[in-house]
Image (cartoon, rainbow, N blue to C red):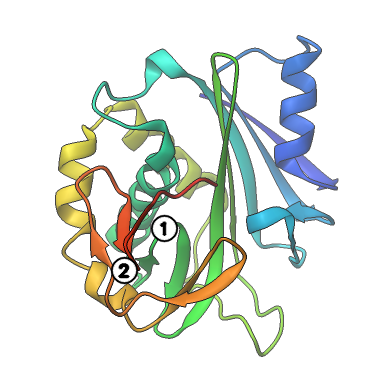
Amino acid sequence: MEIVYLDKIDSTHTYLKNMIKKNEYLSPICICADLQTNGIGSRGNSWQGKKGNLFFSFVLNKEQLPKDLALQSASIYFSFMLKEVFLSQGSKLWLKWPNDFYIEDKKIGGTITTVSNNYVFCGIGINLNTVNNEFGKLDIEVDKKYILKLYFESLKKNKSWKEIFNSFRVEFHKSKKYKATIENKKVSLENAILNIDGSINIDNKKVFSLR
């Protein structure tokens, strides 16, 4: 995975998609910025960051993903793989369904995944520094370049969705203390049932991670 490091950018995700569209970059590639001024959050919201936090986006061809991975749950897959990397370094980071990174009871980041033609784009933001009282930050000191190196080495192993899911469902109970936005409404996950494809059953509906 080639990694391009930038000092400042509006959104690594938007920038990468535009560069791929113009054929100025070729997949697979990752864009990492020291500061992101207008990052894309869930449901079209912006993700506010601070200089020095971890902001990166990467693109893969669909054929590079595990055969058993439903694209609707790619965010869970990419997020959990990164969570495992941080855990290997001593962090207590956990993943709230479907793609929010938490330290204890505070969100510290998230993932957005979009699909365009044969490409799958994934953007991730993690607070390494304190942003405000609403959000937390990572509980360990890390070197961003080293973390990305470990992460992409891990992705290259192409672990099956089944293997990742079996680990993710063990900690899914933590998500039940929180809410998720479903059809623009905050819905408690207390009674949610996790399906093998990464979706949940809640209020008689099947809901995928569509971001």
Question: What's the CA distance linking mark 1 and mark 2?
Answer: 23 Å
Q: Which residue is mark 1?
A: 98
Q: Position of residue 192 (x, y in %)?
A: 28, 69
- Front: mark 1 or 2: 1
Q: Residue furthest front?
A: 204
From what the image shows, is residue 136 above or below residue 207?
below
From what the image shows, is residue 72 above or below residue 192?
above
Question: Is disc 1 in contact with disc 2, using a CB cutoff of under 8 Å?
Answer: no
Under mark 1, the amino acid is Pro
Pointer 2 local density, CA inside 10 Å: few below 14, some 14–19, many at least 20:
few
Q: Residue furthest top?
A: 23
Q: Secondary structure at mark 1?
A: loop
Q: Position of residue 54 (x, y in %)?
A: 62, 56
Q: Position of residue 50 (x, y in %)?
A: 76, 68
For image coordinates 46% across by 57% down, the residue present is 99
From what the image shows, is residue 150 above or below residue 171?
above
Number of numbered discs visible in the structure rendering: 2
Task: Using the rendered view, name the quadrant where residue 9 is placed.
Answer: top right
For image coordinates 26% across by 21% down, the residue present is 67
Q: Position of residue 127 (x, y in %)?
A: 60, 68
Pointer 1 local density, CA inside 10 Å: few below 14, some 14–19, many at least 20:
many
Q: Which residue is mark 2?
A: 90
Earlier in the chain: of badge 1 and badge 2, it is: 2
For image coordinates 54% across by 59% down, the residue present is 110
Q: Nearer the viewer, residue 66 or 190?
A: 190
Under mark 2, the amino acid is Gly
Can residue 41 be seen here? The reply is no
Q: Secondary structure at mark 2?
A: loop
